[in-house]
Amino acid sequence: MSIPLWGKAGLSKLTEEASVTIGSDAEPPPEYVLRNARVVLENEVLSGTVLVRDGLIADVATTTSLSASVDLNGDFLLPGMIDLHTDNLEKHLKPRPGVKWPDSLAALIQHDRQLISAGITTVLDSIALGEYQLGPARRELVAASADAIDRGTRRGLLRADHYIHARCELADRGLSRLLPEVADHARLRLISLMDHTPGQRQWRNLENYRRHRQMKVSDAEFADHVAELVSVQARFSPSHLRLALELAGRRSLPLASHDDTTSDDVETGAANGVGISEFPTTIEAARQANRHGMLTVGGAPNVVLGGSHSGNVSVADLARQELLDILASDYVPSSMLAAVFRLSEQGIPLWKVVAMATVMPARAIGFVDRGSIAPGKRADLVRVGLRDNTPVVESVWCAGVQVH
């Protein structure tokens, strides 16, 4: 089996250009200028203008002679952010325990609007393929998510560009039943290999696992619970790993590992063709991923909160040690922009942090048509003003069309 190696040594291998998902009746003006902006480019912040023509960036300059222009009054102009991992759709589909929203498309549209208002113009909606938390209801949630993304895209009801990130819970007995729900979906762009079995990776510390799960059981009952999950892992993980790797090879999709904690975790991923280390929990794992040329992804909420809510490594520390390549919103869409400016305040050049939310995620999954403000790229743009030192999304353009 041939698995594509993705990461720093294998960027931009997908050449298929993504389609515009904005409503078919939304036509951008043929040409206009966004002027008087602090334009965040790949390696600098330029005071100047951006010319948009037919939905693409035509030019970046310091002056303009065109009268059809929008004055940004010195605000920042960023590329539209690209989010490789968000669980936010699931919050709309299942807003409370035991509650499943009856209209999955309506839930997706509300999620979409929330992303746009946060400055995210391309998103990989993370769909968890595992029944360990929700039992049989998980299959309904997976099917509803995939169907809503398909219908919303085809009907032009979405403002952001939506794709699927299949989170494969290898140790879950239900994975083989759930993977077919997304395996041939046209919008599938990333596969991650997860294992939340207690005693390793994120849950190496069993007390942290017990506390996070709020398990009010006796020590003996907790020990039985852990033993059962370890047994299930041994039974199902090898075959489920083969399924995920076969899918990645067949579809030529990038692979990510999840919650790497030790060097051995990273080595296992590297042997399987993983090019993205998603949410490494320790400096040790992040360094080993860097040595292998993997791209590391950190959660933006970790930056905003000043550290991990579950005792893992500080993402800001990873950034300061140049061990962070990509920011993802994880579970709070608005955290992306907040994290970008928080890291900039801590001394990292703004253009470099913005690249973690734009240039690098685009390269990681092969989006060659977006991710930076440069001639020929899609005009996915975000106007950001600092209001009382808080970054605020003022306007958003997707493929040249103003959507916010």
Image: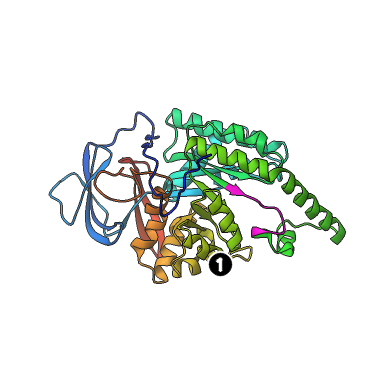
Badge count? 1
Q: Nearer the viewer, residue 208 or 386?
A: 208
Q: Position of residue 35 (x, y in %)?
A: 22, 53
Name the residue at 55% across, 57% down.
279
Q: What residue is at 80 percent from the left and 53 percent from the top?
A: 227
Residue linked to disc 1 = 284
Q: Which residues are magenta?
A: 193-201
Specify whether residue 202 is in view: yes
Residue 58 position within the rendered picture, expressed as x and y whole percent measured from the top left: 21, 44
* Magenta-colored stretch includes residue 54: no
Q: Residue furthest bottom?
A: 347
Query: Label 1: how many residues lie within 10 Å, few (<14), some (14-19) or many (20+)?
Result: some
SS assignment for the magenta stretch, majority: loop
| Residue 33: percent from left, percent from top | 21, 47
Is residue 198 highlighted in magenta?
Answer: yes
In this view, the residue in front, 369 or 285, is 285
**Residue 97 visible (yes or no):** no
- What's the residue type where badge 1 is placed? Glu
Q: Quadrant of the C terminus?
A: top left
Residue drawn at x 70%, y 37% as measured from the top left: 137
The residue lying at 51 percent from left, 59 percent from top is 298
